[in-house]
Structures are given as structure tokens and as C-alpha cells.
Amino acid sequence: MLTFLSPGSPARADVRPLAGAHAHTGAPSAATFDTAPARAALERLLPRHAGQFTLVPDPAAGADTFTVSGTAGAVTVRGSTGATLLTGVGWYLQHVAGADIGWPGDSIGMLPSRLPAVPAPVTRSAQVPHRYALNDTDDGYSGPYRTFEEHQRQIDLLALHGINEVFVQVGAEYPYYRALQRFGYSAEELRQWIPGPGHQSWWLLQNLSGFGGPVTERLMRERAELGGRIAEQLRGLGMTPVLPGYFGTVPAGFAARNAGAATVAQGDWAGFDRPDWLDPASPVFAKLAAAYYAEQRTVFGDSSMYRMSPLHEGGRTGSVDVGAAAGAIQGALHAAHPGALWAVLGWQDDPTAELLAGVDTSKLLILDGLSDRYNRLDRETRWGGAPYAMGTIYNFGGHTTIGANTSVWLERFGPWRAKNNSALAGIAYLPEATGTNPAAFDLFTDLAWDAGPIDQRTWFAGFAARRYGRPDAEAAAAWEEMRKGPYSTSSGLWSESQDSLFSARPSLSAVGAAYWSPKSMRYPAGSVRRALDHLLRVDPALRRSSAYRFDLVDTARQALANHSRVLLPKIKAAYEAKDLARFRTLTAEWQDGMRLLDQVTGSDPNLLLGTWLSRARSHGADRAEQDRYEYDARSLLSVWGRRSTSEGGFLHDYANREWSGLISELYARRWTAYFATLDEALVGGAAPREIDWHAFEEEWAGRTTRHPDRPGGDPYRLATAVAAALPAAATG
């Protein structure tokens, strides 16, 4: 258990961290390691079959290496860490047993009672030392109010798929809260400054403060304890918990309260006033950084890797020497954690040449968020040979859209790693929200463990076979359509597929929901429509897995979403032709589609607004606090922030997603209200009345209406209804 200090009290020797927190930095022991955490994870992942696996610690095998062997019902996995043992189990499931544990959905119910033998012992080693996971925004967009069991499941899946470095953001506010009370701020001031959990990701990036709060000390303590448990769970498997580092974010008025401090106002980020930046070269910075790391150590223990991105998406340097500042940031990190690796996001113009010139780049890892987005990339020249991880951000804001630039991954990873003087040292799994696109998760993480080039068509055929438990011609045909369509989008401008017009702010000229999303289809819509038909014809014996049910619902959802781009131009044409009868017929079809969309998404547990909201409310101690956290959660999905942010910063609907409840209560109501104004205009021969959409959405964000947090309806029947409503010819 954690022992916390009272607010404002100095650090004391009797404060006890989580058991073993100081002893672990993420690296396994050179002699041996305890396999119990891996065994416990295996029992969670494969409760009916865990006893058929023998896990053998084998650090001498070399870093990141596993060997799988054994007879029927008696499989042995040897590995260099607990996580690598689980990666070996994952390899066995994929290549021998023909089963999938995806994110989300699995086919383990299709496994035979006695697991098959391994034909011959197989040894695999990771092709790169760094296999990093989680975007800085993941805690916000994937679920800031998740339970430990949900985070534990995430860790199990990451280990199963070969990840060894995981960003731990939950509870990161607590070291700030504790440390800054020694530098002139009251506990109350800091609780007002720290945002609600839904928006804390962007506070840690120095983009905003305060919104969605105030937070209570009780909540911060609970989140810190949760983050500490997550970090310890990772250490137990020999994985590295990547903790947020300190690079200078301070509340307003810091220089006035601390003699000798120099701060730089950071200006605006998407309509928010950014927190100030404390010049890292000033002597006060070293003191505050030391206090921060000491408080962090108390709760989270030590690590060998820390995540920081100064001047993210803008910011102002003022008179600060960026190179000297970067050196001071790294110096403060190494004073607290000698030799620790600094992970910095490769995004927009960062990291700059000035920053890189000021640090020891052998202790730096650039997480490239643009590897699959643009063309003509030369990372060695761009970053002067600094080590980097090839990354992907194929999901923005938690959009439910299907697709990824998988062909680009396959075309680049091998050649980039093999080139002369290559600085490629890892992969970085960086979707802004996890838990969508299970095929993309599987394939991207496979890059780090497959020694030879991966053939995309062969890989997807194998995925189709194991995804539902055994080969099936219709499943193979479905995933071949998906491979050729949404999973073969190209680089050049986008790394994500288009979002849905059903979730867009109403307009006859709408081309996307999020301002920053693609404005048109990135693949032929017919590929998804045909995939839906094939999935509906999969052998009934394979339809009972959660993997099949999720894929069926998700494909039906995407087919409907794609149809919105066919239907809206027809509605526009009818309106402009003043054809009232056709306008009403088409808008009724649109609204029927949205009702069906809400129903089909309501049949899967991964697509429910009610779950998102009930998690948020569960963290409040009383009604007022529950309402505050629900607003934090709702606003992130809709207005995102205040009016200046939503409108001026173009962040409204940035986190749009097709979830049951969100569709019916926000998106469908918006379109109904909009179509009513157009209908009135056609009948009356006048211009349509305007609607204040921000006020409409803000009213929704302030609601406390309840929604189901358990699925309802038959996924197969509802997906069949979607197919019936969308003739193949209608989608091209």
C-alpha cells in the first residue's frame, strides 16, 4: 500500500513507496527473475489453458528472446523477461494454435481443450530494442477514469504483443501538486490549476490548465496510487514504466514567488492560455525538478526512461537558449535518475536541431509520430543520427474509423533499419486512443519480431484465419477486402482514415467531423460494404467469439458511416432544387440510418457511451463531484473546451466517435434540429434559421442523463439489417 503525506508537509524517510519500487528500473535481473507476474497474466489471458504452459526464465538467452517448444498439452516457453515469455505465448497462439487475443476481441473460446504441439522448437528475438507504446493523449481519449483491472488488461495485451516500454500517465499530477507547495502555492491554488483527468494529457504537454476541474486531493491520491500500481505491474513483467519527466511547466506567478526564477509566457494553444515555462537554465529549475522527481519516486518508484516534449505544438522560447535549456532538462533528469533515457515525440518540427544540439543524444529516443504520414523522410539527416523509433498514429481523438497505412509500415520498416548508418532503434505504437483497429495493432507490433519482410496479403490471410479460430473462406474474403481498402491507405498527408459525417456538426457541405481529419474517403467504400457481406456468411460455428462479434459490428458501423458520404450530397441536391418531397424522403433515410447506427453499436460492449460516463461518475465522492467529472468526460467528446477552444481552436468534435448513446443523444439530435430548419425554410421560402451549435453541444456536455453500460440486441441481426439497408451498388 502507499503511504501519503499530508498536504504541504516535507518529504520524510518513513514514506513508503510501493513494494520494490526503488529496486526496479524496468531492466530484468541478469541472473534470473520471478515468473509469477507472467504466470498471473497468462491465467488472466488464457484461464482454461494456462496450466498447459511451462514458463522458464532464461535471461542468458539474450535480450528480448523467447523459445517455444513442446508436445500437445505441454507447451514450454523460455524467455529473457516475464513480458518476453508472454510474447512467446502470443507467438504460439498466432502461429501454432491459430487463435487471436486482440485489442479488442478474441477467439480463445475456439481453442481445443488440449493445445496443439509445436512441430519444432522456435526461437525469436526482437529486431529492435525499443518497443514503445501509448501516446501522450491515450489516457484522455481511451479513458481517464479506467480501473486498475482495465489497465492491467492493457498491460497483458501489450506484453503478449511484444511491447517492452509503456507510458504511465495516470496520477502524474500528484508529484506536481506535492512539489509546487514548496514553491509558494497553496493546495487550493494547485487543485484549481490542475485539470480534470479527461484533460490532463494536454496539461502535461503544457497546452492548458484548469479545465474540467477542480480536482480533489482524494482523487489525486487515488490516481497516484493507481499509477503506482500500473508502474509496479510493468516492472514485475520486466517492462519499463515510462514516467513523465519535468521540463519546466509552472503555474502563473511563479517568478514573483521564487527569487531568481525566470519564466516565459507560452501564449495560446487552440484557445487556451498555456501554462508558463520556467527557464531550465535558471537555478530554481534544478531545485523544482529535484523536488518533483523526489515526489514522483515516492509514489511511482524509479525508472530508466522518462517522457518529455518541451514546446510541444508551439510555445515560445523568449530569450531562452533552447540548447542550454535542453541540456539543463537532461541534467536534472540525470541528477535524479543517472543515465535515464529521455523519450521525446517526433511531431511537427520537434525535436528541433537546437534541442538536439544541447543534449547527449545517446540518452535520447525520438518517438516518430510521422513515420507513416509523409513521404521522402530521412530521419538520420533530420535528427543528426539520434536514435528514433518508427511510429504510427493511425487514430486521432478516439475516432472509431477503420483503417491504417499498413502497407507503408511494411515498405519502410525493413529498409529503414537496414540502411547504412541507420538510427532506427525501435517501434512506437502511438494511436491517440487505443482499443480500435485490432488488425493494425497486431501487424504493427509484429514488425519488431519478424526477421524477414512481411507480405501484407499473406499476413492478412493469416489474421483472418486466427481471428475467428480457424480458416474460413468468407472470413478470408472479408479481410482481403479490408486489406485492399482501409488497410492499404497511402502516405503523403494522412495516417488516419476519414471519419463519419453522421458525427459531423450539421451542414449540407460537411466533409468531415473533426476539423483536422481527412476531407474525403481514403479508400473505395465498396471494400467495406463487400467485407460486411462476407462476414455475414462466415460459418455459424465461428460466430460466437468476441472477435467475430466486434468485427461484424465494427464493419457494419463503418459501412453505414461511409454511406453518410453518399447520402449527404443527395440531400444537398434536393434542398437546392427545392424538392421538398425528395428532401423529406432522403432526410428520413438519414435519420433511419442514425437510429440503426445507434442500435448496432449498442450491441457491442466497446462502443457504449454509458460505460464512458459511468466510469467518470464512479470517481466522485458526492453528486457535485460526480457531475463535474461527467462534464469533464462529456466535454472531451463534444465541445472539448470552452467556446474559444471549441470554435476558435477548431476542437469541437475532435474526439468524435460512433458510440451508442452519443449517436442518439448528441449527433442525431443535431441533425434532426438542422433538417427541421431546412424543412421550415423550404416550406416558408425563407433562409433557414441559424443554430448556435456550441450552445447546443455545451448543453449536452452538461447533462447527467444515464445510458446503458452493457450491450443490448443481437449483433448478427443488426448487422444484417445494416446490410439490407445498404445495397452494395449504393456504395460503389
Image: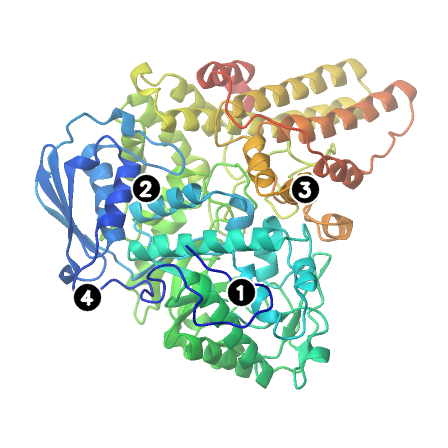
Q: Quadrant of the N terminus?
A: bottom left
For discs 4 and 1, the disc positioned in front in the rendered view:
1
Count residues near mark 1 (Cα–Cα under 10 Å), then give few for <14, some for 14-19, many for 20+. Answer: many
SS at mark 4?
loop
For discs 2 and 4, the disc positioned in front in the rendered view:
4
At 63% across and 51% down in the image, what residue appears? 196
> Mark 1–mark 2 contact, CB under 8 Å?
no
At 50% across and 68% down in the image, what residue appears? 295
Q: Earlier in the sequence, mark 3 or mark 4?
A: 4
Q: How far apart are the alpha carbons under marks 3 and 1?
A: 25 Å
At 54% across and 42% down in the image, what residue appears? 398
Q: Which residue is mark 1?
A: 175
Q: Earlier in the sequence, mark 3 or mark 2?
A: 2
Q: How far apart are the alpha carbons under marks 2 and 4?
A: 37 Å
Q: Which amino acid, mark 4?
A: Ala
For discs 3 and 1, the disc positioned in front in the rendered view:
1
Q: Quadrant of residue 250?
A: bottom right
Q: Earlier in the sequence, mark 3 or mark 1?
A: 1
> Mark 3–mark 4 contact, CB under 8 Å?
no
Q: Which amino acid, mark 1?
A: Pro
The disc at residue 456 is 2
